[in-house]
Amino acid sequence: MRIRANALLLLCAALTLPASAAAVPDDIRNALQSPQSLTAFIGEPLYSPAVLAKIYAARGDNPGWVSAAGPDAQVQQLLDAIRRSRDDGLQPADYHLNALNNLLDALHAPESFGALRNRQLTALDLLSSDAFLLLGEHELSGRLATPDLEPRKSVKGHPERLTKALSEVFGGADPSALLSGMAPADPMYLAMRAELARYRKLTAEPAVIEIPAGPTLHPGEQGTAIAALIARLRTFGDLAPAAAATARVNAERLGLSDRARFLVASWDDALDAPFDLRLKLHRGERQVGEVAPRHLRRGLFGRSFLNRLRRDVCT
């Protein structure tokens, strides 16, 4: 009876032990050899399985984000970076945010032990690396690829830099800090980032001015809808000084600040001196017309707008 009781105690203890550190590399190797099985387990595919296979093979398929005790601190740091990617106009859900959170919750469940826990740790490790690589790719190259503007879903533009950065994470570096260092430092990018934050704050406030429903508005019209539109544009900074300030920043960035002056006005109201207006039309303006506001696209190459400008301004 004593032998049988001891055997039972040993069995219970084995069932409650954490995952075996020696078993995880085998699970990582198997998962990368058959990514479909990992997708079936977590419900999301890896974006860069081939790149991950090379990275992990170079380190003996050992995990970099987890240990037998559970997830390392870098996992939470990565999640912080993923959530903050929204500040750059990115979508946190693109970087396995939901799957990573689900795996962390599952690892704290009572049934997380043995082979199941090994699979959960393996999935968490590979998803963390995959998310880090893709977010880094988007920070360095942008989310949309040209010329088709399709989202980038794999590491192509900076594989060596990203592989080196991931190795630093495996060595204990903060993934959030590394990813922050990959974001553009261009003044225009930083200005756009600040504007995105401002717009989000404005749209989240209940006091946003609504424009009454009705027929299409046209230049020169007046009424309640026009007044609401003007007030809304002023609130969002798209009318008057803010728009002119953005134009000044653009001119300075292009080295044209000494050749241009930006005024806030309706047509020529702010001009107090004679001036020459020179217009040149060519086929290339078709491309401008395709992306310009609708009131600049009326007529061939926007000539309706230009004709009005010539009539109201030129003498």
Image: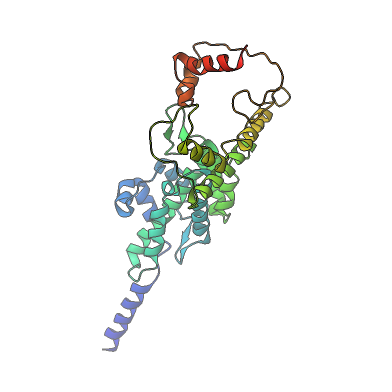
At x 55%, y 47%, the residue is: 197
Q: Is residue 4 above or below residue 257?
A: below
Is residue 241 at least partly visible in the picture? yes
Q: Quadrant of the C terminus?
A: top right
Is residue 34 at least partly visible in the picture? no
At x 52%, y 41%, the residue is: 232
Q: Is residue 299 above or below residue 99?
A: above
Q: Give x and y (percent) for residue 237.
A: 58, 40
At x 48%, y 57%, the residue is: 65
Quadrant of residue 122 within the rendered picture: bottom left
For residue 31, side relative to residue 176 (left or right): left
Q: Give x and y (percent) for residue 185.
A: 63, 40
Identify the residue at the far front of this view. Answer: 223
Quadrant of residue 276 within the rendered picture: top right
Q: Give x and y (percent) for residue 40.
A: 29, 51
Residues 12 and 276: in front is 276
